[in-house]
Amino acid sequence: MGEQVLTEPEPEHVAMAIGQGLLVQAPYSGAFVSVADLVGHGTILDVRRVATVCSR
């Protein structure tokens, strides 16, 4: 599970936090997915935890 992180100056950019100050992201449409440092991505506007509830 990871958290969605929305940052300035482009709040439409969403990355997934994976812990230890790292993000999984594709910086633009068509880019390769990469792991990047959270530092340098601007001010964090919002963090959302996405969870799925499974019923058995």
Image (cartoon, grey):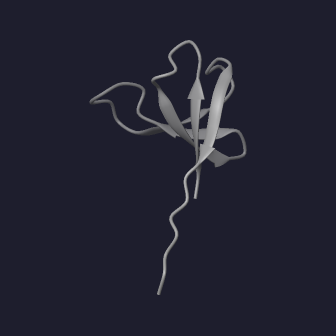
Residue 22 image offset from top left, x and y in percent: 64, 40
User: Nearest the camera: 9 or 22?
Assistant: 9
User: Nearest the camera: 11 or 29?
Assistant: 11
Instruction: Please tell me which residue is depicted at 69% across the width and 25% down the height of the picture.
Output: 39
Residue 7 image offset from top left, x and y in percent: 59, 23
Residue 2 image offset from top left, x and y in percent: 59, 52
Residue 53 image offset from top left, x and y in percent: 52, 70
User: Nearest the camera: 15 or 47?
Assistant: 47
Instruction: Please tell me which residue is depicted at 67% across the width and 25% down the height of the picture.
Output: 44
Q: How many marks?
A: 0
In the picture as drawn, the residue positioned furthest to the top comes out as 9
The N terminus lies in quadrant: bottom right
In the picture as drawn, the residue positioned furthest to the right comes out as 20
In the picture as drawn, the residue positioned furthest to the left comes out as 30
Give left or right: position of 20 versus 33.
right
Q: Which of the 4 quarters of the picture holds residue 4?
A: top right
Q: In the image, is residue 55 above or below residue 46?
A: below
Q: In the image, is residue 27 above or below residue 50?
A: above
Instruction: Please tell me which residue is depicted at 36% across the width and 24% down the height of the picture.
Output: 28
Q: Which of the 4 quarters of the picture holds residue 43?
A: top right
Give left or right: position of 22 versus 54.
right
Q: In the image, is residue 7 above or below residue 25?
A: above
Instruction: Please tell me which residue is depicted at 46% across the width and 38% down the height of the picture.
Output: 34
